[in-house]
Image (tube, coloured by chain):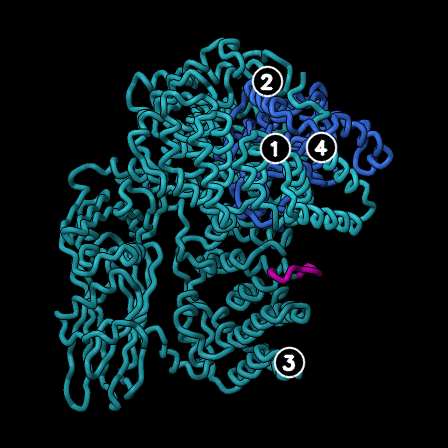
Amino acid sequence: MINAILVFNNHGKPRLVRFYQHLAEEVQQQIIRETFHLVLKRDDHICNFLECGSLFGGSDYKLIYRHYATLYFVFCVDSSESELGILDLIQVFVETLDKCFENVCELDLIFHMDKVHHILQEVVIGGMVLETNMNEIVAQVEAQSKLEKAEGGLSAAPSRAVSAVKNINLPEIPRNINIGDINIKVPNLSQFM
Amino acid sequence: MPAVSKGDGMRGLAVFISDIRNCKSKEAEIKRINKELANIRSKFKGDKALDGYSKKKYVCKLLFIFLLGHDIDFGHMEAVNLLSSNRYTEKQIGYLFISVLVNSNSELIRLINNAIKNDLASRNPTFMGLALHCIANVGSREMAEAFAGEIPKILVAGDTMDSVKQSAALCLLRLYRTSPDLVPMGDWTSRVVHLLNDQHLGVVTAATSLITTLAQKNPEEFKTSVSLAVSRLSRIVTSASTDLQDYTYYFVPAPWLSVKLLRLLQCYPPPEDPAVRGRLTECLETILNKAQEPPKSKKVQHSNAKNAVLFEAISLIIHHDSEPNLLVRACNQLGQFLQHRETNLRYLALESMCTLASSEFSHEAVKTHIETVINALKTERDVSVRQRAVDLLYAMCDRSNAQQIVAEMLNYLETADYSIREEIVLKVAILAEKYAVDYTWYVDTILNLIRIAGDYVSEEVWYRVIQIVINRDDVQGYAAKTVFEALQAPACHENLVKVGGYILGEFGNLIAGDPRSSPLIQFNLLHSKFHLCSVPTRALLLSTYIKFVNLFPEIKTTIQDVLRSDSQLKNADVELQQRAVEYLRLSTIASTDILATVLEEMPPFPERESSILAKLKKKKGPGTVTDLEEIKKERSSDMNGSAEPASVNASAVSTPSPSADLLGLGAAPLTNSAPPPSSSGSLLVDVFSDSASAVAPLAPGSDDNFASPDLASSEVVSEEPADTVHDADELFHKFVCKNNGVLFENQLLQIGLKSEFRQNLGRMFIFYGNKTSTQFLNFTPTVICSDDLQSSLNLQTKPVDPTVDGGAQVQQVVNIECVSDFMEAPILNIQFRYGGTFQNLSVKLPITLNKFFQPTEMSSQDFFQRWKQLSNPKQEVQNIFKAKHPMDAEITKAKIIGFGSALLEEVDPNPANFVGAGIIHTKTTQIGCLLRLEPNLQAQMYRLTLRTSKEAVSQRLCELLSEQF
């Protein structure tokens, strides 16, 4: 079972957090911090698995992570999951994000938090893997978008808003993000195995 | 076209997020967030009804604030309201908020459940999907109560859409995990199994996850899944890479499903049906063959997916542990991975090989990789990989390579990461002890350990070396010489001073003949470390000094001078001061003979399981396969030819006994059961350990230590005391499930017991209390064993003082060793004179076979597998009897645990039944025992079934346990 899915950037800022066991808010934040420190000190070419000690209150858990450009994707799983299988799953998730957002970048995760959650929901529910077939996942997400469009009620939001905001704030963005790295294009992904 | 169009954002949200990101400080951020929270709160509270768009926007803001690590304590109600909206977008965001933020105990659950119920009934697959996802994500008990009956119906209904089926399967799995009791098994189970044949691979994947979890708890119900899983797997494995279309991942057909199917098969033993078995073997061979084929793609995803399947196949081969051919191939494959350039694969190969090392078919094959593994230890850059290498070396260690492996581990220890040092120390200590042919090597190894990693050497380790040196006279001289030499290093670890002090205090005389280690030199050497040590070590050294007074009378005055010095006699630490004062007095007034008796050499410690092993198990958790499996091998080879099935044997060690004390010193029972006579007692006992008699004269007030409160308050006291021998049976039976209490009582005498058992050894303290105010004279308790019993039970008693003063209590220790299984109980006969009359009485002493039980935890599947193995009619004894006591489940559980076996929860398909498992340890053999107790409340009857490998044992245990209910 997957206990938690954490995505944070190179500075440890959480970008997507999903716990599948109930933990108090402080504990969640503690886990995010500790996980960040655990993976941060590992360089890119060593093993993608590590024991997380007592982080989740048992020795049975492992952290399985991948590092894409500015983001770390960390899955905390118990021994019933295959390590390489989870690595594949992370890849599937990221590739799906990439398809849904077209060249997904960290900002997409920030500004479309709800969408990212909905996409994740098509891959993992309740800590269990729902679907691994990317086309199927994308089809589901597209169906959702269609429904949203059909309802149309939300189009009140000017569609240029986000890009406008992105541009307006460009000078400040480098505080967190290295612009050159923002794109986590799939063709570049594999080199970070 | 992207599925999410980027322009669809919400302006207010984007502005808020940008604001936050522009905050220059944490304070500014918090300020901005508080402002926003206030804004949202007022919007929610305001009279103006919010439209869906605004609600969605605010909920998104709250989610973002939550992500930043701030608690959200409002908005829940608004989210719940969104659930009942008819608009998809509003419903969706409502469910998202609830899945992320609502605690499973929230009082809103009822409202949420209502909304879910409506959506499930809507027959709208999108809404059903949202509702199911929410149940799976929250998974609370209330949800299980509301929906556990409904979801199986959705899952197996013919007209349910595939995507809903997938969600329903996982939803049910989640509910089963949180509240297994609320998910009723029923006709749906067989239909779920048939989902393995479903057209849609996504449905099959979800169903496989569900079945795997259910099958672990209910193997019988889901047995048919084995053949279906095998045929499904076979179809995938043999398919061309394009057959499965979308489920082909980087040229690997349905890797995720293959992994899941292989996991499911690991819930079961190898299939019995030869056709199925053959087909499975074929699959496994094909997977192994494919590993050798050239890759179809250079992408790492391709090899990743392929290897995920391969590793799972290897796990299954190891789990079955029945096809030597496959095991050896698996081992070779892992051997290749050990040298692979991918760190991940090296890591996994080391991990899998650890379990492989425990199979007798492949142990030798694993050993051939020793050089590679040692190399990994030296060169891997990643500590998690090095850790796996240590584990594997430990698992592959046996007599033939122990010296090499221990040496390499010691080498590595010098540079090892701090996080794993303690574990390595424990492993080295265990291996050194287990495979020591030559105990000088053992002593050297442990001293090296202390030298290299003194801070990580726990007490268990240095206690153990002392225990072993004391028990083996062939190594004592060497040990004394070695510690003496080691102590000469200018800086040595305090643990070394402890070991050195203890060993020289016992055996310093063995090297005193050499002028380089004369008594005075030994003393000066130790004393030069004294001031650098902590209080407990100094206390130990003081005891060494008083032992020296006895060993080396020629330096007595030097030692007395030291004891007399102000820094000792007036030491601020009360413990040190007391020792100095008492030892000084002892050395001054006691005659040589008395000194020789009081300070005599330590008697050997009783042999028992290494406490270090217990510590390692505790550290790694009982589930660690590596070390435990390894021991299983060790044991089964030690006792080859023993009749019991190896599998039962393995479980003997797979559960650390809950009572196994970490100390492992022989002194433990003494210090534990009799309260230390004075504050100084505990440390003294540490040092003098087993020699209780030696402590007594040193310790004031040792005669009042019997007033053990638990005896006085024991519920047995209030019962009708048994007057004669034969009526004592009932009290006797009470002791079957407990170890302490009053065994006998009449007007004159009370007999209390405290006992503890470990493996095949035990120790019983018998307390005789004189209830009168008159002395008992010629008080002689004797333990009598029949001839039969003598051969299977070794009892040693120490004589007690023949006079027992009025109101006083005396204690007698019985050391017990169970040689083989036995039926009867020994008799305790007591004779004494009281006021001129001669008293003679006998009681059965409650030393029963079940005392040598060690509980064994096992899964339902293991239990029934073993249960089946013991199906010979002679191995089973059954008794059907009327309940003698009220039939209370909790009391019954307590009794089964008290009886000594493990109580296995959720093993028996009928939750009203009780099952237990354990191992009876005798000196000659170990007997695996399984028991099952089926209460019948209507009839007020029980049926008790015992299965063990030995008829007499089944018989005796059944007799004993039948009396308890």
Foreground label between 3 and 2 = 2
| Chain letter of the residue beneath label 2 in the structure image | B
Q: Position of residue B87 (x, y in %)?
A: 56, 30
Q: Position of residue B485 (x, y in %)?
A: 63, 59
| Chain letter of the residue beneath label 3 in the structure image | B
Which color has been applied to chain A in this rendered view? blue
Looking at the rendered structure, the kind of residue marked 1 is: His
| Horizontal side, residue B694 vs residue B729: left or right | right
Q: Give the class, few, some or many, for how many residues have Cα within 10 Å of label 1's Cα (few <14, many ≥20).
A: some
Q: Which residues are magenta?
A: B488-495
Above or below: residue B72 compared with residue B558: above
- Which residue was labeled with disc 3? B572
Looking at the rendered structure, the kind of residue marked 4 is: Met
As measured in the structure, the alpha-carbon distance from the residue carrying label 2 to the one carrying label 4 is 39 Å
Foreground label between 1 and 4 = 4
As measured in the structure, the alpha-carbon distance from the residue carrying label 1 to the one carrying label 4 is 16 Å
Looking at the rendered structure, the kind of residue marked 2 is: His
Q: Position of residue B98 (x, y in %)?
A: 55, 41
Q: Position of residue B397 (x, y in %)?
A: 49, 38
Same chain shared by disc 4 and disc 3: yes
Mark 3 secondary-structure assignment:
loop
- Which residue was labeled with disc 4? B10
- Which residue was labeled with disc 1? A117
The answer to whether marks 2 and 4 mark residues whose Cβ atoms lie closer than 8 Å is no
